[in-house]
Amino acid sequence: MSRGAENVEDRVRVVIAEDSVLLREGLTRLLTDRGHDVVAGVGDGEALVKTVAELAAVGELPDVVVADVRMPPTHTDEGVRASVQLRAAHPGLGVLVLSQYVEEQYATELLAGSSHGVGYLLKDRVAEVREFVDAVVRVAKGGTALDPEVVAQLLGRSRKQDVLTGLTPREREVLGLMAEGRTNSAIAARLVVSHGAVEKHVSNIFQKLGLSPSDGDHRRVLAVLTYLNS
């Protein structure tokens, strides 16, 4: 029996692209059991692009695509290339890619475009059902969802590039949690500090990275992506 989305407004429409039929069916069941609509499931990047185009043509563009990084025919980067193509054609479409392990090149390629509605998770996270479903919904609604391992590797590389040397260890920790898509309240709970303390750290991060108030809500993501353009 479906549990239903916690709120009607949280219900999202999803297209799943995964060549493993077993995993594709598992993801479909996982999402539908929680009240979301899986409107299509495909097994390769070409079918993904075609399916989304067909849905868009009849005014039924999904809220988010969940795609494996590696799919037929070469099992290299078909999922990422299809995702980048879809984001360019449909800026309002959320894209969450799943990977067996962290592939910096693909993560960077995906994150180098628009800062809204993007996610990169390791497949192991699917086992953490609530967090995975929350990530799908967050990306569908224009937020970000980056796996902690992805954040750790990318931020580790950025430190070598001296982009974040002005940040304190605590500010780097806050930035990493921001990159995972967590709100200030969630960060405060994770670090066991006050909401005000988190706000101060976030403000310091923006200031040290040269992100002015005019950047608006984009600053949270830009703070994480700054090093990508360095």
Image (spheres, rainbow, N blue to C red):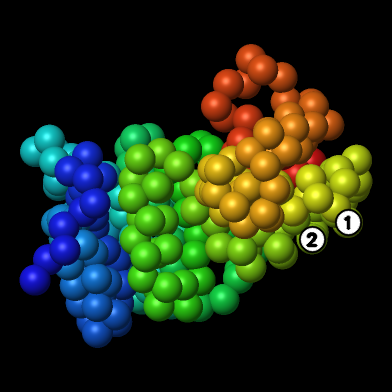
Observer-nearest of 127 and 161 = 127
Amino acid bearing label 1: Lys
Mark 1 Cα shell of 10 Å, populated few (<14), some (14-19), many (≥20) = few
Q: Classify residue 69 by image quadrant.
A: bottom left
- Horizontal side of residue 127 vs 32, given as left or right: right
Mark 2 Cα shell of 10 Å, populated few (<14), some (14-19), many (≥20) = few
**Spatial CA span between label 2 and label 1:** 7 Å
Locate the N terminus by quadrant: bottom left
Image disc number at residue 160: 1
Pointer 2 with pointer 1, Cβ within 8 A: yes
Element under disc 1: helix
Instruction: State the residue at coordinates (67%, 54%).
Output: 192
Q: How many marks?
A: 2
Instruction: State the residue at coordinates (79%, 45%).
Output: 171
Q: Is residue 110 visible?
A: no
Q: Is residue 164 visible?
A: yes
Instruction: State the residue at coordinates (71%, 19%).
Output: 212
- Horizontal side of residue 188 vs 89, given as left or right: right
Residue marked by disc 2: 156
Observer-nearest of 90 and 186 = 186
Q: Name the spot of residue 132 as percent of width and height, x first.
A: 39, 64
Q: Name the spot of residue 211 as percent of width and height, x first.
A: 73, 25
